[in-house]
Amino acid sequence: MRYLVISDIHANLSAFDSVLKDSQGQWDMIWCLGDVVGYGPDPNECVAILRQTKHLCLTGNHDWAVLGRLDINTFNEDARSAIAWTQSVLIEDNRAFLEQLPSSAEEDGFTLAHGSPRQPVWEYIMDSPTAAANFEYFMTPYCLVGHTHSPVVFELVDDGDVVPHLPVYEQPLPLNGQRLIINPGSVGQPRDFDPRAAYAILDTGEMTWEHRRIEYPIVETQERMSQSGLPFRLIARLQFGW
């Protein structure tokens, strides 16, 4: 089985379209690790496209915030503004889709969460100590997470230490039963100073994971954000990947 693994689309249709075109014919099912909406200008379009595919999608913290399940005062001012705008434009069918998304899953030998296996919706795994604390919260060899918007692999080694590995693009990583927490990065709002959309291909037949990046027309997204009155900082950051 081949999976297109994506996370943090954040209502960026141009980025999502570019990922789908770049990976066309190379996957059987989508695993989406949450935050389909929030920040970007195309929440209805992104949800609609995802709904048309064979997929498993988790909920993320921005999805919950749009649904009123999180206090938006815990978000920064720009994020709050984008959440309020998304609430105002999201159609009922797409809201109903977000309502039924699970916060975590276990599929085909992999644990899936938006944030972490310990706190699926909200916790960020950004460093080795946080990753180390999370390995005891899943029993499968591998856990896939998003939320940080930065691709990375955390490996639990024999002495109990956790070693972070930066992605090597277009080069399959063999999955040999080692204990890993893997983040594919963000489709719609990368934060690793690389503005290209990030995604991954997981092949459970060959047992390989492949990090990928693809350029997309950032200006198109920025123009739609500006037309929608979304915050300038959210528009500007797309160009620089921060």
Image (spheres, rainbow, N blue to C red):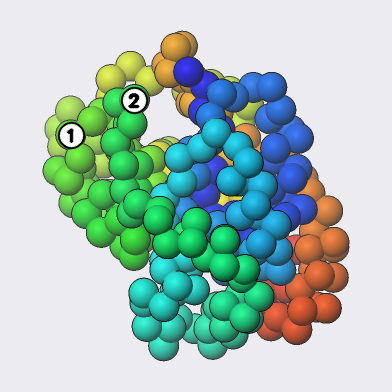
Q: Amino acid at mark 1?
A: Met
Mark yes or no: residue 234 visible: yes
Q: Secondary structure at mark 1?
A: loop
Residue to which mark 1 is pinned: 139
Q: Is residue 195 left or right of residue 38?
A: right
Please name the residue shown 43% across and 18% down the image: 204
Query: Which of 86 and 207 lies nearest the eye of the viewer?
Result: 86
Residue projecting furthest to the top: 206
**Cα distance in 3D space between marks 1 and 2:** 13 Å
**Kind of residue sitting beneath label 2:** Asp
Instruction: Please indicate whether residue 17 sits to the left or right of residue 183 in the image.
Output: right
How packed is label 1: few (under 14 Cα within 10 Å), some, or many (20 or more)? few
**Front-most of residues 143 and 33:** 33
Is there CB contact under 8 Å for labels 1 and 2?
Answer: no
Disc number placed over residue 108 in the picture, else none: 2
Q: Secondary structure at mark 2?
A: loop
Depth-wise, is mark 1 or mark 2 nearer the camera? 2
| Residue at 83% from the left image edge and 78% from the top image edge | 227
